[in-house]
Image (spheres, rainbow, N blue to C red):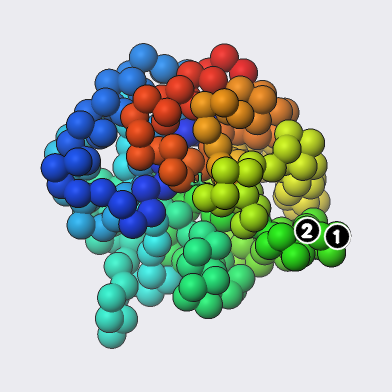
Amino acid sequence: MRTKLIAGNWKMHGSLAGNLALLQSVAAGAATLPTLSFTVLIPFPYLPQAQALLANSACSWGAQDVSEAASGAYTGEVSAAMLREFGCQYVIVGHSERRQRHGESDARVAAKALAAIEGGLTPIVCVGETLAEREAGQTLAVVGRQLDAVIQGLGVQRLPHAVLAYEPIWAIGTGRSASAQQAQEVHAALRQRVSQSDLVVAAGIQILYGGSVKPSNALELMGLPDIDGALVGGASLNADDFLDIGRAAARA
Ligand code: 13P
């Protein structure tokens, strides 16, 4: 049985004052849902605040990007070792907003995932198709290509140290999530693709769904056989909504 992970991607939101109540409420709520794992993926400057507030709580914390390099002349980048110094457990890599806005290639995403694992972090590796790709019937080919790069870059033996997240780009921030059938089809295909390399790894790997997850659709999505949690954007900025998604996942 795979533990479900409820991950909040704050994106570029937050303030020291506003984070306080949010983090405290999430930590308190997470403690009431011991069958789940909770994490918040927050902007870099707030990592010390999360470390102070969430240490020894039921909610871990992490970042939204990591450099593939260990150190050096990489202005603006942050290494896995730096994130570990602030107690990060997880880091998102390959979010579509970074693939699209920063031109991150499949190979670069795989390199970041490798750097994260070697630095002691668990990468949450995002894959997902655009609306045009879905409408052209290319969904499974696109996410398959993105996943293959990660399997190749990490080697299947490191894959258990990663989490996968399926985030259809057309469902992100649009209020329109994938249907249960659409999500399950892709999740099952991803797991099937991993199973071509290793059956045991495929059975154990967590595959999160992301894209307009909210309390009203969480029960159905989290009840699907190949969905092992949620990567939540907008709804993770509201403690009640985020925790309600967790409650739905615990019931599903
Ligand atoms: P929304 O939940 O706001 O659609 O964002 C999803 C996402 O991109 C999480 O990484």
Q: Residue furthest front?
A: 175
* SS under mark 2: helix
Q: CA distance from mark 2 to mark 1?
A: 5 Å
Residue 202 shows in the view: no
Q: Is mark 1 within 8 Å of ligand 1?
A: no
Residue 50, percent across and down? 22, 42
Residue 116, percent across and down? 42, 59
Residue at 75% over, 46% down: 186
Residue at 58% over, 75% down: 105
The quadrant in which residue 78 appears is: bottom left
Residue 145 shows in the view: yes
**Residue placed most toward the observer, 226 or 113:** 226
The quadrant in which residue 51 appears is: top left
* SS under mark 1: loop
Asked if labels 1 and 2 touch by Cβ distance under 8 angstroms, the answer is yes
Residue 250, percent across and down? 53, 18
The answer to whether residue 217 is left or right of residue 34 is right
Q: Residue furthest bottom?
A: 73
Q: Residue furthest right?
A: 137
Q: Is mark 2 within 8 Å of ligand 1?
A: no
Residue at 14% over, 42% down: 17
Q: Which residue is mark 2?
A: 134
Q: Tag 1: Cα neighbours inside 10 Å, few (<14), some, or many (≥20)?
A: few
- What amino acid is found at the position of numbered circle 2 in the picture? Arg
- What amino acid is found at the position of numbered circle 1 in the picture? Gly
With respect to residue 241, does 230 lie above or below? below
Q: Which residue is mark 1?
A: 137
**Residue placed most toward the observer, 70 or 211:** 211
The answer to whether residue 203 is left or right of residue 58 is right
